[in-house]
Image (cartoon, rainbow, N blue to C red):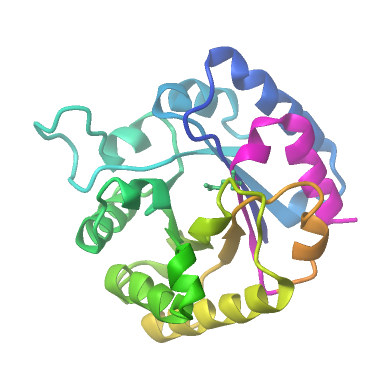
């Protein structure tokens, strides 16, 4: 099973559902439809209406983040996994580099993963090195730490997906070369195997994925799917990514 996840970030108003209507009508007729799953993470404001519209359809809805406490609290503007689940989301991203940059620590991320799973949300846990860590050959070490500090053996592996998103690649048009990326995905899967003491969960790639570079990315069979930012805001680009992947 391959995953195509569209992360809308701060994008979208109710009428943006048209983008998803087009993606839905493509994927409901696509001959490869049983080979992949589509997940869209719109802003919180759109989760409920989108989840209702696509109930029992090919597209599943997730949130871009969640709070590290359960149910309700007195933290202004916080939204818990319980609240997200209650409006129909099935997934949540955790640890996107945008949120790490805003102060998400490993301890917070561990609580986010834990509460999301307790509330029956599946987790897409994002990891990735920055430019200077890459330059100094620290990538493997950084990724291992990000994984081992947050993911624990007791977590339900079947409800976790890991997304490798090098920070220097997000929104820049730059992607890792094929060899480096293959090695990194293998490294991540090895670390995950050690954590869970069994087969690795799915590992996705994210960072400037588009309808052109998917041609190279599809050759790396170890990649179990893609986390797509910018290109997921266009139905044409998102559909072309899927089309080109199965070409
Ligand atoms: P991008 O974003 O595809 O625009 O690089 C990816 C992400 O931040 O998840």
Q: Quadrant of residue 222?
A: bottom right
Residue 19, image x and y in percent?
Answer: 68, 25
Residue at 54%, 34% (x, y): give it: 8
Above or below, 112 relative to 65:
below
Percent position of residue 216, x then y: 80, 64
Q: Position of residue 241 (x, y in %)?
A: 77, 47
User: In this orientation, which residue lies closer to the viewer: 178 or 74?
Assistant: 178
Look at 35% across and 70% down and name the residue there. 146
Is 34 located above or below residue 52 in the figure?
below
| Left or right, 131 with reference to 25 | left
Quadrant location, the N terminus: bottom right
Q: Residue at x 55, y 51 (%)?
A: 170
Front-lying residue, 178 or 38: 178
Does 228 lie within the magenta span?
Answer: yes
Q: Is residue 103 left or right of residue 184?
A: left
Residue at left 30%, top 67%?
Answer: 150
Q: Position of residue 193 (x, y in %)?
A: 46, 83
Query: Relative to 6, is 23 above or below?
Result: above
Q: Nearer the viewer, residue 146 or 79?
A: 146
Of the 4 image quadrants, the one containing the C terminus is bottom right
Q: How many marks?
A: 0
Q: Which contiguous range is marked in magenta?
A: 222-247
Q: Residue furthest top?
A: 15
Residue closest to the far right: 247
Q: Does residue 18 appear in this view?
A: yes
Q: Quadrant of residue 14?
A: top right
Against 51, is 231 above or below?
below
Q: Is residue 58 visible?
A: no
Residue 132 on the magenta span? no
């Amino acid at each position: 099973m391959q995953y195509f996840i569209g992360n809308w970030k701060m994008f979208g108003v109710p009428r943006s559902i048209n983008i998803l209507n087009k993606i839905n009508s493509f994927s409901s007729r696509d001959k490869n439809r049983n080979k992949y799953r589509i997940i869209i993470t719109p802003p919180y404001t759109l989760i409920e209406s989108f989840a209702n519209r696509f109930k029992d359809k090919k597209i599943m809805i997730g949130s871009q983040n969640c709070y590290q406490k359960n149910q309700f609290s007195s933290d202004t503007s916080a939204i818990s996994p319980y609240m997200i689940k209650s409006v129909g989301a099935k997934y949540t991203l955790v640890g996107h580099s945008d949120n790490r940059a805003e102060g998400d620590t490993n301890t917070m991320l561990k609580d986010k993963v834990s509460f999301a799973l307790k509330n029956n949300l599946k987790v897409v846990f994002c990891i990735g090195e920055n430019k200077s860590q890459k330059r100094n050959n620290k990538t493997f070490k950084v990724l291992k730490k990000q994984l081992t500090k947050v993911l624990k053996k007791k977590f339900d592996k079947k409800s976790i997906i890991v997304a490798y998103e090098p920070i220097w690649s997000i929104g820049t048009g730059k992607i890792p070369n094929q060899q480096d990326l293959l090695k990194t995905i293998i490294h991540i899967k090895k670390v995950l195997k050690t954590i869970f003491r069994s087969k690795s969960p799915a590992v996705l790639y994210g960072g400037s994925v588009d309808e052109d570079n998917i041609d190279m990315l599809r050759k790396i069979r170890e990649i179990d799917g893609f986390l797509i930012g910018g290109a997921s805001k266009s139905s044409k680009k998102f559909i072309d990514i899927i089309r080109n992947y199965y070409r």
